[in-house]
Amino acid sequence: MASLSLSAVPTTPLSSRSSPLFSKTSTHRFNVSCNSSADENPKLILPKSTSLNVDRRNMLLGLGGLYGAASLTNIGSASAFPVTAPDNIADCVAATDGVRDPDKAIRGTACCPPKLSDSIPPDYVLPNFPQLRIRPPAQRVDDDYIVKYRAAIAAMRALPDEDPHSWKQQGKIHCAYCNGGYSLEMNGLPDVKLQIHNSSLFYPFHRWYLYFYERILGKLIGDDTFALPYWNWDNPTGMMLPAMLAPVFDDRGNPNQLLNPLFDPFREVKHLPPAIVDLQYRGTESGLDCIDQINTNLSTMYSQMINQTTDTFFGTNPGDDGKGTPGSIENGAHTSVHIWTGNSKMPNREDMGNFYSAGYDPAFYVHHANVDRMWHVWKGLNPLTNKDPIDDDWLNASYVFYDENRQLVRVYNRDAVDVTKMGYDFEPSRTPWINNRPVARVKASNVAAQSVGVVKKVEEMEFPVKLDQTVKVLVKRPSTKRSEDDKKKANEILFLNGIKYNGQQFFKFDVLVDDVDDGIETTAASSEFAGTFAQVPHGLGGEKMFMTTGRAFVINELLEDIEAEDDEYVLVTLVPRAGADDATVSEIKIQLVPTE
């Protein structure tokens, strides 16, 4: 395993080392020394200034949510109902979600959990917890914890497949809910698939999923204090696949799941430790060294956590077409870790690289434990502004699970907003990405103005526009010379509407603003990098399955950093990275959205 030593000595940013066009420096970049050694544990010394407090200027981006008509008009359909999962958890179809070639599913697409009772599931009531379960960062657990965790998973694997607590049935839950196993029949829409991804349902559904999974594991080993670890991929000490998940070899030199039940053979071998996770993963290796990869990851976390309103962080509610829009982490780091972990040699990038199979890998649960932590951390960044959705449709959305007693119960989003009321919390881990604000290039002149006559204005474009190659377009801003008070009252947001893509494959493109075409790639460590759109595959091959959604990027701080706040137009660049051959975008625009 790699040994990382990291100090708080100020260094020149990544971008400024590679080009004379970069001259701004950051006093918060890390000087990292990465030395591979299979016998050493990661060691890291972090700066002390990594609390959850963010200075007021940075938090201007996070003010308010997008609850007004602008958000519903631009990036999601207005939900006229709280999404309701069927009473009968076994009342589902093969979770192919439009797939015509189920034989390629090595895990099988019959994902319906077993039916144990005909009774209507009662509403779940959170019990009183005498003691909080504390979820630890995976890189800091001791041997006693690993022995306990392995025993719990071994006990789950030993259960008969038809038991709703079994390893197979727990894996099926994700497949059923995420690959079209259920419809919105309870909402009067039997022909519309229930989909908990690409919408504001993403966080609460997965929180409940892990809640019962964790309690089932605790019951299997007779320890009601047992808590899942979280894969701390937002911290340099945790950016490798957790060591506890690595293979243990038998006397013949073969990985043996009996020796380590946390091991899954369907993982990318080249991404086992000491490989550093790539939070901007494109399906191919980034080529960055350890130092640059860590700093790019930290900048990625900054942009996906700091520059967010409620709607851009959570996504938007599904409408009567079942479609919403994804939030920043779901569409970013969450997707990257899934694809990075899945095995590229498997037909569908099993296990983690496809929604239908992801729940069969123990890595899924430690990954989503950190995704769940991101929700918790985001609210703590600024409790006055970073708030959960408040509309009744979101609060009353519900799902059905088997609890730790094999009782089928119905749970609601409204009961999942406070982790302590759910009986658990997270062991603290520093968040150095708070200080990794991306670094801008020195702006010699108005980039957009120089592009007039070379690049079309958005009003001159014919939509939808294909993403099979880089797209450049000049987009008019709604206002210039915005004061600090103006920024408090409204966020400036770049909307990409009607993003249509083939959901059968990994799909990703990057979004840049006023990027200089000088042959040097703009990465997440640069302010010109507005964000990314990335999707884990939903299907298994066969006929193409087109999906449509949208994406929004708050660009207040970006415009400030690239010195474009006074410009009438900005140059928006869409760069396809994976699976974009059939992808299109139907609208690109910038609007001011009130913070209240």
Image: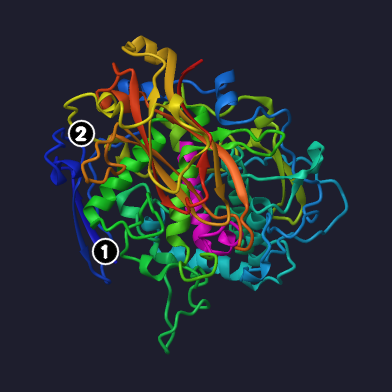
Q: Inspect the magenta stretch and tell me whether residue 360 lies in it.
A: yes
- The residue that disc 1 covers is 2
Q: Say above or below: 139 vs 388.
A: below
Closer to the chain start, of discs 1 and 2, is 1
Looking at the rendered structure, the secondary structure element under dot 2 is loop
Q: Inspect the magenta stretch and tell me whether residue 400 lies in it.
A: no
* Contact between labelled residues 2 and 1, with CB atoms less than 8 Å apart: no
Q: Position of residue 283 (x, y in %)?
A: 41, 58
Looking at the rendered structure, the secondary structure element under dot 1 is strand
- The residue that disc 2 covers is 441
Amino acid type, residue under disc 2 in the picture: Arg
Disc 1 packing (10 Å; few <14; some 14–19; many ≥20): many
Q: Quadrant of residue 573?
A: top left
Of 502 and 386, nearer the camera is 502
Asked if residue 431 shows in the view, the reply is: no
Picture colour scheme: rainbow
The residue range painted magenta reads: 351-376
Q: Quadrant of residue 389?
A: top right
Q: How many marks?
A: 2
